Image (cartoon, rainbow, N blue to C red):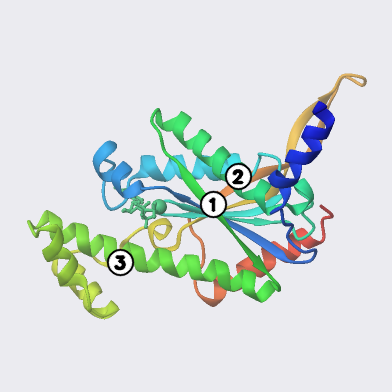
Amino acid sequence: MKFDDLDLKMRVYETSHDRCVLPNMYLVARIDGRSFTKLTKEVQKFKAPFDERFRDLMVETVKHLMNCGFNVIYGFTESDEISLLFHHNESAFSRKTRKFISILAGEASAKFSSMLGDVGAFDCRLSELPNKKLVEDYFRWRNEDAHRNALNAHCYWRLRQDNYSQNEATSKIEGLSIAAKNELLFQYGINFNDVPNWQKRGIGVYWKNVKKEGFNPKTNQAIWVDKRELFVDYELPMRDEYNQFIKDVIERNEKVIA
Ligand SMILES: Nc1nc2c(ncn2[C@@H]2O[C@H](COP(=O)(O)OP(=O)(O)OP(=O)(O)O)[C@@H](O)[C@H]2O)c(=O)[nH]1
Ligand SMILES: [Mg+2]
């Protein structure tokens, strides 16, 4: 068989399951660390419940993903996960889901592993959302997940410091109301209100326009140029204010053609 015939015959099998995200759908990717419980507790021993070095690795991974060939308008990270919101008109790779999922998981894994000096792999999934309100709710969901995780994690690790076993600490927390978990921490002298917001709300990354001083070699003069820079927000709002914040990010970017 000639190579061209063989190529044609085999490509059908490779691409038969390709699908594209429909036009006008909002697209969000969630990239999540694979078996990071083991990585953070056994292989690397990061500080628990929150380690600033781990946080910084995640933030750098978000920035990398926002600069790797897609038009990402908002990045969010909490725990071992990253959510990315693409521009409404994103047209990279003809919106093929296979490309988004494989490239984002690959780029995140490569960046994180090279910074860590060890293997840290990520998976990736997509949410295809038909309207802006669902995008707001998606991010509100992850923002509230951060809050819930932070409360549970602080309770769990405080009990572990107090010599409770894994099972004892887990069952003591299970079934406690939010108020009771706050009270538990208070008994140990921790006011959950004072826990840093980045732990309770997650961290946002978005573009800001900045003026940078440049140089025009033709006129030999200093000039101001407009540039976009990534800004890392460790003080995100929450609840309805966060919905509004996400709405603003979307609307600001809809004015800019992709
Ligand atoms: N020590 C430490 N662990 C962290 C930190 N941030 C996230 N983690 C851990 O990362 C893990 C994330 O949880 P999951 O994504 O549900 O669990 P996983 O083990 O990655 O499992 P899969 O995602 O299903 O592969 C939890 O065990 C968290 O405790 C941190 O700052 N310090
Ligand atoms: Mg994980």
Question: Residue placed at 75% from the left, 53% from the top?
Answer: 95
Of the residues shown, which amino acid type is indicated by label 3?
A: Leu
Secondary element type, mark 2: helix
**191 or 4: nearer the eye?**
4
Q: Position of residue 44 (x, y in %)?
A: 29, 37
For label 3, the crowd category at 10 Å Cα-Cα, with few meaning under 14, some 14 to 19 and many 20 or more, is some
Q: Residue at x 36, y 47 (%)?
A: 36
Disc 3 element: helix
Mark 2 residue type: Ser
Between tags 3 and 2, which lies in front? 2
Helix, strand or loop for disc 1 = strand
User: Residue 73: x percent and y percent?
Assistant: 68, 54
Quadrant position of residue 74: bottom right
185 left or right, relative to 258:
left
Q: Cα distance, mark 3 to mark 2?
A: 33 Å
Marks 1 and 2 in Cβ contact (< 8 Å): yes
Separation (CA) of disc 3 from disc 1: 26 Å
Please say if 103 is above or below 133. Answer: above
How packed mark 1 is, by other alpha carbons closer than 10 Å (few <14, some 14-19, many 20 or more), is: many
Numbered circle sitting on residue 102: 2
Residue behind mark 3: 151
Badge 2: few (under 14), some or many (20 or more) residues near its Cα, within 10 Å? Answer: few
Most extreme residue toward the front, as rendered? 1
Taking the spot 40% from the left edge, 34% from the top edge, the residue there is 119
Q: Quadrant of residue 182?
A: bottom left
What residue is pinned by disc 1?
Answer: 124
Indicate the position of residue 90 as horizontal and vertical percent values: 77, 54
Q: Disc 1 to disc 2, how far (Cα)?
A: 8 Å
At x 47%, y 29%, the residue is 114
Q: Say if mark 3 contacts mark 2, CB within 8 Å.
A: no
User: Residue 220: percent from the left, percent from the top?
Assistant: 87, 19
